[in-house]
Image: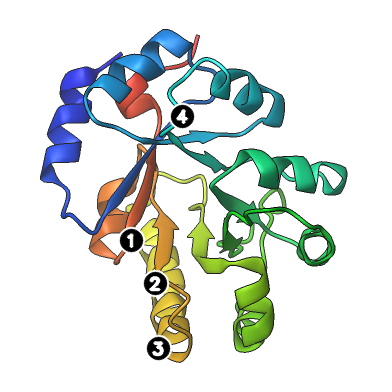
Amino acid sequence: MNLENYKKISSSLDKNIKLVAVSKGQPIEKIHEIYQLGQRDFGENYLQELIAKKQHLPKDIVWHFMGNIQTNKVKEICINSDYIHSVSREKVLQKLTNINVKNMPKILLQLKLGDETSKSGFLPEEISRISYDKPLVKQLNIVGLMGISQNTADQSKIRKQFSQISKLFNELSKENQAFKFLSLGMSQDYNIALDCGSNMIRLGSIVFGERK
């Protein structure tokens, strides 16, 4: 646990930047420590872990789902999340249009960055098509984009990819005011993401320490 890192980073951020503490694999006690410092946004990758933690933590926590989405779990993920960062394929989008939940979470569309075959996400032209469908954007509560950089130590490559998604986000947000959030940057590259215009960073190991 690195509370000093958390304090330093959170105090340095502009008010319009949202820090999401990625708590997957972390015990309740660690989450509560950061909660006591004022952190309210937490991110999880697995539905069952999210549900279990919600039962033992304060009700005012804002939960961000960031993991792979199975289509048969879409409704349950929606019921238990305030934000979903990882809507990355058409099947999930279609499933979202067909479910009925009391409060639809805020949805971010994942853009495919780089050419790694393991990375999922929409292509830029697919995201543009979705964004121009304003009734769909309103129905699904789509509020922005999410990206994960290529797994590389080459910072120039990361910066190029982040600039790509930032440019697309700026274009879309001019056309559709619903696009408010650019979720970009993790523990190893959040400073580059902030330079490129991210207003939502997802930090795990740098604040919680490495998972055991």
Answer with the quarter of the image where residue 162 lies. Answer: bottom left
Which residue sits at x=66%, y=30%?
A: 46
Q: Which residue is mark 1?
A: 198
Circles 4 and 2, Cβ within 8 Å, touching? The answer is: no
Foreground tag (4 vs 3):
4
Q: Residue at x 66, y 67 (%)?
A: 140
Badge 1, how many Cα within 10 Å: few under 14, some, many 20+? many
First in sequence: mark 3 vs mark 1:
3
- Find the distance from the CA under tag 1 to the CA under tag 2: 7 Å
Residue pictured at 47% horizontal, 76% vertical? 178
For marks 1 and 2 on the same chain, the one whose residue lies earlier in the sequence:
2
Q: Nearer the viewer, residue 168 or 3?
A: 3
Marks 3 and 2, how far apart at CA: 12 Å
Q: Amino acid at mark 2?
A: Ser
Marks 4 and 2, how far apart at CA: 33 Å
Residue carrying label 2: 166
Q: Residues within 10 Å of mark 3 (few under 14, many from 20)?
A: few
Work out whether 2 lies above or below 60.
above
Q: Quadrant of residue 11?
A: top left
Q: Secondary structure at mark 3?
A: helix
Mark 2 crowdedness (10 Å alpha carbons): few <14, some 14-19, many ≥20: many
Q: Kindly indicate whether the residue at mark 2 contacts the one at mark 1 (C-beta within 8 angstroms).
A: yes
Q: Amino acid at mark 1?
A: Ser
Badge 4 is on which residue? 59
Cβ atoms under marks 3 and 2 closer than 8 Å: no
Which residue does the numbered mark 3 point to in the structure image? 174
Secondary structure under tag 1 reads: loop
